[in-house]
Image (cartoon, grey):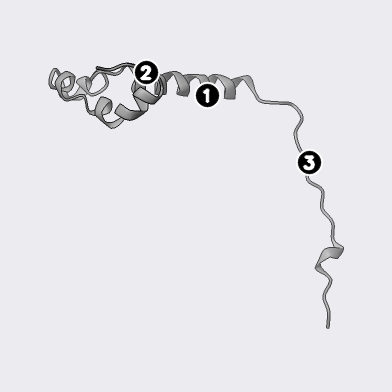
Amino acid sequence: MLLNFMSESSQIYASKTGISKLAIMALAIVFTAGLFVVGFDQGHIFSLVYGDQAFEDLYIHELTHDMRHASGFPCH
């Protein structure tokens, strides 16, 4: 008994409307926030929780140190 599974065909429909403006805006916001975190944060984010100690510890700076240099941000 041989079953033929290829006898049924189905069509795939693709939307040709493009990328929505909302998706582009969301991506731009995420990119800008990520750029701030990697490149410009010097304790600002954690200072909301840790206070002035965050400016001395620089947790995000240390975690993204090599990425900062690869992106062209000087930090020394």
Q: Are marks 3 and 2 in contact (CB under 8 Å)?
A: no
Location of residue 47 with respect to 6 vertically, above or below: above
The quadrant in which residue 68 appears is: top left
Location of residue 23 with respect to 15 vertically, above or below: above
Q: Residue at x 66, y 25 (%)?
A: 19
Question: What is the three-letter code of the residue carrying label 2?
Answer: Phe
Residue 32 horizontal/vertical position (percent): 44, 18
Q: Which mark is residue 36?
A: 2
Q: Nearer the viewer, residue 28 or 73?
A: 73
Q: Residue at x 32, y 16 (%)?
A: 74
Q: Residue at x 78, y 45 (%)?
A: 12
- Front tag of 2 and 1: 2
| Crowding at mark 2 (Cα within 10 Å: few <14, some 14-19, many 20+) | few
Q: Residue furthest bottom?
A: 1
Q: Secondary structure at mark 2?
A: helix
Question: What is the three-letter code of the residue carrying label 3?
Answer: Tyr
The residue to which callout 3 is attached is: 13
Query: What count of labels does the image hold?
Result: 3
| Crowding at mark 3 (Cα within 10 Å: few <14, some 14-19, many 20+) | few
Q: Residue at x 84, y 56 (%)?
A: 9
Which quadrant does the N terminus fall into?
bottom right
Question: What is the three-letter code of the residue carrying label 1?
Answer: Leu
Q: Is residue 36 found left or right of 46 in the rendered image? A: right
In three-dimensional space, the C-alpha distance between marks 2 and 1, rounded to whole angstroms, equals 14 Å
Nearer the N terminus, badge 1 or badge 3?
A: 3
Residue 23 horizontal/vertical position (percent): 58, 25
Q: Secondary structure at mark 1?
A: helix
Residue 49 horizontal/vertical position (percent): 19, 24
The residue to which callout 1 is attached is: 27
Q: Residue furthest right?
A: 7
Nearer the N terminus, badge 3 or badge 2?
A: 3
